[in-house]
Image (cartoon, helix red, strand yellow):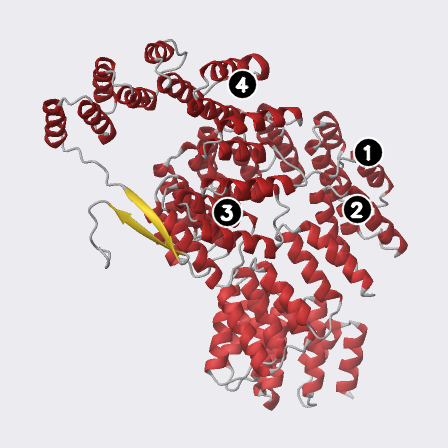
Amino acid sequence: MVNLDLKAFCREGCFKEALHIILNTHNTPVDCNTYLQLLQTCIAKNALSQGKHMHSLITQRGFSFATRTTFQNNLINMYLRCGSLVDARKVFDDMTERDVSSWNTIIAGYRRYGFPREALTLFHQMQHRGVQPDPLTFASILPACAKLRALEQGMDIHQSIMERGFFSNVVVASALVDMYAKCESIHKAREVFDKMPQRNVVSWNGMIVGYAQNGFVEKALETFKQMQLADVKPNSTTFASILPACAKMKALEQGMEIHQSIMERGILSDAVLANALVDMYAKCGSIHKAHELFDKMPKKTVVSWTVLIAGYAQNGVLEEALRLFKEMPQRNVVSWTAMIAGYAQNGVLDEALRIFKEMPKRNVISWNAIIAGYAQNGFVEFALETFKQMQLADVKPNSTTFASILPACTQMVSLEHGMDIHQSIIESGLLSDIVVVNALLDMYAKCGSMLKAQELFDKMPERDGVSWNAMVTGYVQNGFVEKALEAFKKMQLAGLKPNPTTFSSILPACSKMGSLEQGIDIHQSIIESGFLSDIVITSALIDMYAKCGSIHKARQLFDKMPQRNVISWNAMIAGYAQNGFCKTALKMFELMRLSGTYPDHVSFACVLFACSHAGLVDEGCKYFKGMSDLYCITPIIDHYVCMVDLLSRADYLEEAVNFIIKMQTKPAVVMWRCLLGACRLHKNVRLGVFTASLLFKLDPKNAATYVLLSNMYAEVGRWGDVQKVRRLMKDRGIKKIPGCSWIEDHKRLRAFCVGDRSHPQT
């Protein structure tokens, strides 16, 4: 009778009454099933204290079922669902016997509580204890790999799934798709998705979200269409995933079609979807439609207001954003931060700072917004100062803080500041955060410390595409092109597919090495990856072919481009100039102008280079003057160097000297060295000696000056002076850098340096 009463109270939700009966029942036994139902009631009511009380009571009364594995599994589940991971772990650790359900419950608990690394440790312990994982285990542990971006461990788990025959389980296969997508291995995610014997809405959602989060927004939209053709009905999660893809692509027409689908399914009342629609319209530039939808919302949350305010700010309508902000019935930190970010994005930093100071309460997100605002607008010293103020205000930086502040160190090329922030990251316990470590890698690479970057990279427990891209780009930018190509190959061996950033970074390495065969292989990979439509990548391919001497292949690519920008034109103009087709380069420049493409600094540097190597002095002077007169482009050092080279090569040496003297900016050392090279070419010893004496003062340790002067003396037979220069080099400890060249042999690059006898065939 007591058990029936208790179960009735549980069904009715009368928890206090049920607990009262238990406390006052000593002689009548309460069975295990009744207690299990009471535990479920604790979960439903989120009643942790009552659950603890009941657990204590069961232990005190010594019920035999208290040590049963099934009952203890339910206890673990109750503690986890009621918010006490510590109590759940205590029950788990005290168990004399554990089954697969025990392990699954605690693993899932650690993952849900935000401890994915601990979840993986438990997964390995489970197998070590001889407990075989089941489909539920894999469905729980794969999201932990995804959270950590632990691709290698995820691939090992994938192998275990295949060996146990669990791939046919749609939940497990969907978790695999999600894991690969979140580990930035989107091609592997698609491979798994395509092999799935059956797919449900979760599988399709995983693929759509994966494409969107990895930047393949067109693929996300395409997959959404395929889902509908497969007669799988989208749910709220699908729509909430695809709308940001429309926003990013500014695909207003498709966004409107999705809006119509949401209305037809009668789920527009879903606040998450309504907010996503407002955001989509705003980001697609249809701010009036966004406001119209906002006005029709039956219930506007703080998120709804914030999304619309951010939309107006992103569209540059700051007055309306401020008006809405003032009208908000209730503001939170996020809405205040949206205003700060809006002003910062539009370069109105004074107003951003005013809003920041007026905030009644600031959190780490607010500080991040103002730091990012300073950094993005080039006020890097203010960004670093604000970061210090944040720490003094006892606000603990998070991963976003460090991801914002490290680029400021990069802009300043301040290795010292970067190393200080590295120390702060260690102290904050965020060195295991892959986003933060990737930002550190980028900072060290751009500050020229590749040894430090490599050291950090080698210590990373897991690496994603961003990590590898940082190393590849860093090696190329710092001149270690062989290392860059080596890292590119290792990245692929690690199971990561190159993305557009990887390809646009590695192609310049092929260019610098003159490695045409490897460039052709990379071109093929680009085609297979579907990235040939990317204008940046195609421009990099044109540059690679041109610099590797295959100018006709470069032109073929250029002619096939559906659209071109100034980078594409510059690559082609530079390619012709570097390969000796200087007049063709100038014709390309004129074609660019006729196409309506506006030339930039690089365009004019390419044109002046072409004029210099073709001996077209008058044309070069005309283009140099036209830069500022016709296009309002202020010349920079590169243009001045080209002009000095133009005049010097044509034996207008005195004019070149006058040009340097009359410059509005301080002449660069390279200009005088360029002039010295021309003095050697034209055997003008008097001016050459004068130029060399200047260079000895400006850059006394550079061997090139000594070599050029020595060669000039040799050209005119002044061997005594040649010996004097060589003695001077020896006395000053100046050594000529040995010449080095690369030969491509069966897709392998072999480097040969002067005096190097290490090669077996020397």
When the figure is inspected, residue 422 is found, relative to residue 657, above or below; the finding is below
- Distance from Cα at disc 2 to Cα at disc 3: 34 Å
When the figure is inspected, residue 488 is found, relative to residue 700, above or below; the finding is below
Labels 4 and 3 touching (C-beta < 8 A): no
Q: Residue 761: x, y in percent?
A: 24, 58
In the rendering, which numbered label is found on residue 288?
Answer: 1
* Secondary structure category for the residue under label 4: loop
Horizontally, residue 426 falls left or right of residue 306, namely: left
- Distance from Cα at disc 1 to Cα at disc 4: 38 Å
Mark 4 or 2: in front is 4
Neighbour tally class for label 3: few under 14, some 14-19, many 20 plus, Cα within 10 Å: some
Residue at x 64% of width, y 42% of height: 560
Q: Which one is nearer the viewer's eye here, 582 or 12?
A: 582
Which residue is tagged 4? 633
In the rendering, which numbered label is found on residue 733?
Answer: none
Residue type at the position of mark 2 = Gly
Mark 4 or 3: in front is 4
Which badge, 4 or 3, is on the more N-terminal residue? Answer: 3
Horizontally, residue 291 falls left or right of residue 660, namely: right
Residue at x 32% of width, y 45% of height: 741
When the figure is inspected, residue 715 is found, relative to residue 560, above or below; the finding is above
Which badge, 2 or 1, is on the more N-terminal residue? Answer: 2
When the figure is inspected, residue 24 is found, relative to residue 570, above or below; the finding is below
Q: Residue 548: x, y in percent?
A: 45, 43
Q: Residue 641: x, y in percent?
A: 39, 21
Which residue is tagged 3? 398
In the rendering, which numbered label is found on residue 255?
Answer: 2
* Secondary structure category for the residue under label 1: helix
Quarter of image, res 348: top right
